[in-house]
Image: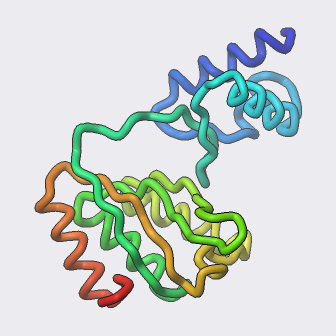
Amino acid sequence: MDNTQRREQILQMLHESTTAVTGTALAKACSVSRQIIVGDVALLRAQGVGIISTPRGYQLVTPLKKGCTRVFVCCHGMDLMEAELEAIVDNGGIVHNVVVEHEVYGNLEGILNLHSRRDVQQYIKRMKDSKAELLSTISGGIHTHLVEAKTEEELDAISQALHDLKVLYGD
């Protein structure tokens, strides 16, 4: 398999998958190292292919559905992260990202795409296993989440749940 065929296979695997595909799985399927996959993904992105890296692997960019979206500004530490994310997904929300503002680099974004408690639990496990710090550590805990839901009522319920947790900034 040459480089072009390998990149086509990567795209095909991403198109056919309903979930993120790990770099390790792509590497195994293509019989190359994970580092080769990282390079291939970078080249595909440079060609305009919308591939994002999530905590669970690579996936193609999907446009926001026809639901409603809202940006929530939150502030908390690691102790409330799980409760915050579960409050969102339990009330029908999808957590698309986390964004913090850096004084030099501007907005820094982490793609999350958390749809369910299971997604949240997998994300929490990865954070704990890697001993990674929250992105919001650099902004004193202040961060935003782009949240999508089917209705404004669901977004209102999410807002109330976050208010009850006392994680909304400025509350």
The vertical placement of 21 against 15, above or below, is: below
Q: Nearer the viewer, residue 140 or 157?
A: 140
Q: Quadrant of the N terminus?
A: top right
The vertical placement of 25 against 126, above or below, is: above
In the rendering, at what x and y percent does residue 65 appear? 29, 38
Please give the name of the residue rendered at 63% of the width and 21% of the height, measured from the top-left corner.
11
The vertical placement of 143 against 118, above or below, is: below
The quadrant holding residue 9 is top right
Count of numbered badges drawn on the protein: 0
In the rendering, at what x and y percent does residue 61 appear? 50, 35
Q: Seen in the image, is 153 located left or right of residue 164?
A: left
Q: Seen in the image, is 32 located left or right of residue 5?
A: right
Please give the name of the residue rendered at 43% of the width and 54% of the height, measured from the top-left corner.
96
In the rendering, at what x and y percent does residue 4 appear? 79, 11
Q: Quadrant of the C terminus?
A: bottom left
Q: How is the image coloured?
A: rainbow
